Image (cartoon, rainbow, N blue to C red):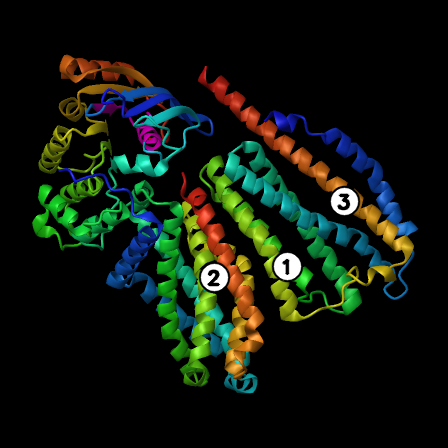
Amino acid sequence: MTDEPILEARGLTKRFGSIAAVDGIDLELRRGESLAVFGPNGAGKTTLTRILTSTLRPTSGTLRIAGRDPREDELRSRRILGLISHQTFLYDDLSARENLVFFARMHGLRDARERADALLASVGLGERADDPAGTFSRGMQQRLALARCLVHDPEIVFLDEPFTGLDPHAASLFRAALGRIRSEGRTLFLVTHSLAEGLELCERWTILSAGRIAARGRSEETDRAALEREYFLRVGKPRSPGAVA
Amino acid sequence: MRAPGAPAGPGFLRGALAVAAKDLRLEWRTLEALSAMALFSLIVLVVFNFAFDLSTVRRLGAARLVPGVLWITFSFSGIVGFARSFQIERRRDSLTALLLAPVDRGALFAGKALANLAALLALEALVLPLSAVFFDYDLLAVLGPMLLVVGLHTIGLAELGTLFAAVAARVGRGEALLATLLFPAASPVLIAAVRCTSAVLDGSDLASASRWMLVTAGFDGLFFFVALLTFEHVLED
Amino acid sequence: MKAAGRLPCPALLLATAALMPAALWMAFVYAPEEKVMGPVQRIFYFHVPSAAVTFASVLVLAVASVAHLTTRRRIWDHVALAATEIGLVFCTIVLVTGPIWAKSAWGAWWTWEARLTTTLVLWLLLAAILMVRGYAESREQAARLAAVLGIVAALDVPIVYKAVDWWRGQHPVVFGRGREAALAPGMLVAFLFCLVVFFLLYASLLCLRVRLLDLRERARDLSDLLGER
């Protein structure tokens, strides 16, 4: 049971007109594993994330979340996955607590308010709970987004460039929060530009280039300089500008 | 931090109500849509008074003139509000988070449509007395039937308006495309609305307009289900 | 995709090409002249078949839209798009020929008569669907949104008709129920013949358009394949 992969993708492909944004990707993630996906703009990272979270239909290929095709039982797969992106998905004019209570209700939690308060405290926003999310700094907003993502206690968390726009201090706070959610046994799928962050946070890494997996490895066996050499070797030929990020 | 036991999802009704409550709370806090709609309505009413001189208004009487003025005001202001209800989801891409919630897409439609209906009814509560003042008719004498007629026909506008606003937002367009889609499609509701309002202002029995009310009731019911079933295809990427 | 290759386009085209001159002859020569209206009445051998084709096209649009949303096959989107475009063309013919007849029969270019008004509303709906297709960010999105709007439009048409009918009251209609018996036999034959030929013309155009859309799609797929090498 525990050996069954929580996420299994075979030959995922997504075409937009004449561009294959994602081109025949195979992936496997076991429960509690963490994977960093590196790649330049236009490598297909966001498209891949959207396919894996079932917000975008692949042109071809199969996907299984916790052993089943998410298309067969959409509500079930949505219950076990969470997504954080560089967009916060929050409402600026609602308070931090109202935002969380709303998303808790959308996930059917009965004790939405208690859950919201507990999460706010855990990301260090307890004192700002009643302030509108729009008045928060970028770092606080991103921590609130993390709380939003965890509201329904997802087993697998997708992160699409979550460090975008964070200053070093905010980034280190956010990194610490991510480390915590990993230690809680959640599966992590992290898309990032930053090789250092990916290596630090995730057990495995993979390089995406032109919609394909160009290289993969284990973080403990990889030192930063070697990964950098590998990365620039693989993505040396940048794709045409304006391709799907 | 972990929550005790995985939640099963809110179900259709609670999901829809959560979306509606959230939209109305946002609107109540900012009054962005309602203030724009109210100002716009005021302008439309004033422009109509410029368009007809006073003798025309007197000669035709309220029952001939006011229904058309009212429903043009309602539908154009409605368009302003409908378009905004999806703009708020685009600002921080919160639509993505809504799509990841374990609720049926139809519940998202029902919630949005409910909030849009409530906002438009609030606007109408403001515009009706104003029109009674501007066009000099006795609103209090016909208040009951008037509320019934306005409510029934506003449902149809809010339903199709919400569906089309989602379509327009999906292709990155706003009010202009929404108006292009809504006016032809909602023409039966608009015709029926004008007919019924006219009957109310004439002081005639509502039974005389009953077949129009039936058309609208059927229209409201039909397109509610059509929108419920098709909304997922509109929201999908 | 292969389904489009099996469409009987050449046969339909041949039949249309052969019968269209005959239809013209039936309408202009064979059919007896109407006593009151004179030659203008002959416009109805084109006007009414165009209207019939327009509303049949809406039916095709509805079926193809539902089929596309349930199966997500491209061929159904091609049929829906073709039905929208060709429906719009015949709708335009109806809207142009109607007023020409109305001017000489009723003395006014435009009357808000139920059938004419419904056709106008339909024209607006079809044009709006093509607009949304043009704005869409991808072919898949265009197909899905157009399918949703196509279903709404098709369901809307009978309601619009009924509403306008009650709104403006009954106006005289030439080929209405109960009046058909009053048509001279020659007129009826000419009318039915033209109706059949117009449906053949519609089927040929639909067939060609679907085939063209399909070929364009395959050309795109091929250029994608070549572009990757």
| Residue type pointed to by label 2 | Gly
Dot 3 and dot 2 residues touching (CB under 8 Å): no
Tell me the chain of label 1: C
Quote the CA–CA distance across marks 1 and 3.
21 Å
Residue A47 within the magenta-colored segment of the rendering: yes
Residue A13 within the magenta-colored segment of the rendering: no
Quote the CA–CA distance across marks 3 and 2.
37 Å
Name the residue carrying label 1. Answer: C118
Q: Quadrant of residue A144?
A: top left
Name the residue carrying label 2. Answer: B156
| Residue type pointed to by label 1 | Thr
Q: Quadrant of residue C177?
A: bottom right
Write the start and end of the magenta stretch as one range.
A34-52
Residue B223's tag is: none
Judged by depth in the image, the label closer to the viewer, 1 or 2, is 2
Name the residue carrying label 3. Answer: C198
**Same chain? Circles 1 and 3:** yes
Tell me the chain of label 3: C
Q: Mark 3 falls on what kind of element?
A: helix
Given residues B62 and B226, the one toward you in this image is: B226
Residue C44 seen in render: yes
Q: Mark 1 falls on what kind of element?
A: helix
